Amino acid sequence: MSKRILWALLVAGAVLALGGRAKASDCAINSSGINLTGIAAVDGSSCTVLLTQTNNPGDLAGVVVTATITNILASSSWSLEFDLTNNPVSNTFLGIDKAAWAGSLANGLPSGWSDTSPQQEDGFGYFSAAYFKGANTDQPITFTFSSEPTFGFNLTNKNGDLNDELFAVHGRWDSCSGFIGGPGAVSADPGDDRSVGGGCTGGQVPEPASLTLLGTGLLGLAGVIRRRLRLNS
């Protein structure tokens, strides 16, 4: 039985330790926007952008959305997927019901979504592509493009400045809602309205570093058990 526990700890520790270090490839971003050259040559290659800015930092602090861009050479298309991957808000997450970005319009929309572009999204920027869905979905949202899309800091917000983020999505919980945007081209404009939404309360969730620490601890415990087994034998 002790050997079984030893092997279980070794496997669990290795999975958590390695999993905690795993990191998706970041999209190449410059002052103009996203450069997709690095993923344009290989079928299925992708890069990810993290969206961490919120219109209500006190209530939505820590909420993270990923925007993953994938090149699908086999079908001569590209995809953009939004996924709320880290939700420390204690209320029940109902899903993402709005998505916006500065760049190419998608020609393939998720079921039930409609085009409302161009549109200002609560101070995050004036976006050339903005899509709205009346109902929420807690599943990843995917948009498709028939050719290589562009995502750039090329529009102005309501204050006449460059839009603050490339992307902005609206998340909804059972008793609150709010925008999550990023990555910022410039510091948030104090004149932007980022006070709408709220009522959410934050709580901590395990992050990659915490998972790595937990995995390391399990591996250490496995080492102690293995040593005792050797001494007993």
Image (tube, rainbow, N blue to C red):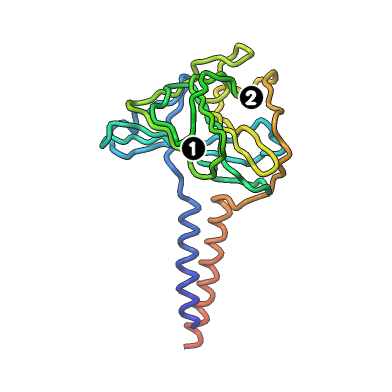
Q: How far across and down, in percent of the image, does residue 47 sit?
A: 41, 36
Q: Which mark is residue 145?
A: none
Q: Identify the residue under disc 2.
A: 122
Regarding mark 1 in the picture, which secondary structure is present there? strand
Q: Amino acid at mark 1?
A: Phe
Assess whether mark 1 and mark 2 are in contact (beta carbons under 8 angstroms). Answer: no
For the view shown, which residue lies furthest in the left direction? 74
Q: Residue at x 46, y 78 (%)?
A: 4
Q: Amino acid at mark 2?
A: Asp
Q: Is residue 104 above or below residue 25?
A: above
For the view shown, which residue lies furthest in the top direction? 160
Would residue 217 be found to the left or right of residue 26 on screen?
right
Would residue 57 be found to the left or right of residue 217 on screen?
right
Q: Is residue 121 above or below residue 137?
A: above
Alpha carbons under labels 2 and 1: distance apart: 18 Å
Q: Residue at x 50, y 70 (%)?
A: 9
Crowd band around label 2 with a 10 angstrom C-alpha radius: few (<14), some (14–19), many (20+): many
Q: Quadrant of residue 182?
A: top right
Q: Residue at x 62, y 39 (%)?
A: 172
Q: Is residue 211 above or below residue 184?
A: below
Q: Residue at x 56, y 14 (%)?
A: 156
Crowd band around label 1 with a 10 angstrom C-alpha radius: few (<14), some (14–19), many (20+): many
Q: How far across and down, in percent of the image, does residue 151 sit?
A: 44, 24
Q: Identify the residue under disc 1.
A: 82
Q: Between residue 89 and residue 99, name the one nearer to us.
A: 99
Regarding mark 2 in the picture, which secondary structure is present there? loop
Q: Between residue 77 and residue 4, name the one nearer to us.
A: 77
Q: Quadrant of residue 69?
A: top left
Q: How far across and down, in percent of the image, does residue 89 sit?
A: 66, 45
Q: Between residue 166 and residue 136, name the one nearer to us.
A: 136
Of label 2 and label 1, which has the lower sequence position? 1
For the view shown, which residue lies furthest in the bottom direction? 233
